Image: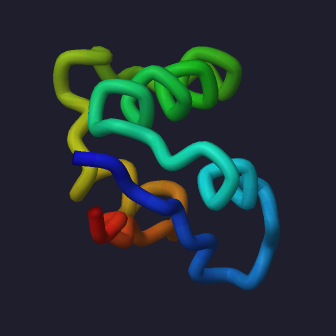
Amino acid sequence: MKYFINDLQGGSFCAWSYEEPATRAEIIEHFNAFRTDEGMDLPKKKLSLRLISSIWGVEFERVKA
């Protein structure tokens, strides 16, 4: 299953996902880099689509096959 990532604050930092939709694992890896860069005290294994959505203000739209 692949997803588009929509920035709920109107930005375009995830616009790339409309050209190359991402899998759940790819999304977690992408946001894990933000977690690391921002020095968040949150283990990678805790990252889920729901938590990512809450922290970074994004939503995931399933790509219709």
Q: Please determine whether, in this image, residue 57 is positioned above or below residue 49.
A: below
Q: Residue at x 66, y 27 (%)?
A: 38
Q: Please determine whether, in this image, residue 47 is positioned above or below residue 15.
A: above
Nearer the observer, 53 or 27: 27
In percent of width and height, residue 62 lies at 30, 66
Nearer the observer, 5 or 65: 65
Please give left or right for residue 11 compared with residue 23 in the image.
right
Q: Residue at x 64, y 60 (%)?
A: 18
Please give left or right for residue 14 compared with residue 42 in the image.
right
Q: Residue at x 58, y 81 (%)?
A: 8
Nearer the observer, 62 or 45: 62
Q: Residue at x 26, y 50 (%)?
A: 49
In percent of width and height, residue 28 lies at 37, 30
In percent of width and height, residue 54 lies at 36, 64
In percent of width and height, residue 42 lies at 33, 24
Q: Quadrant of the C terminus?
A: bottom left
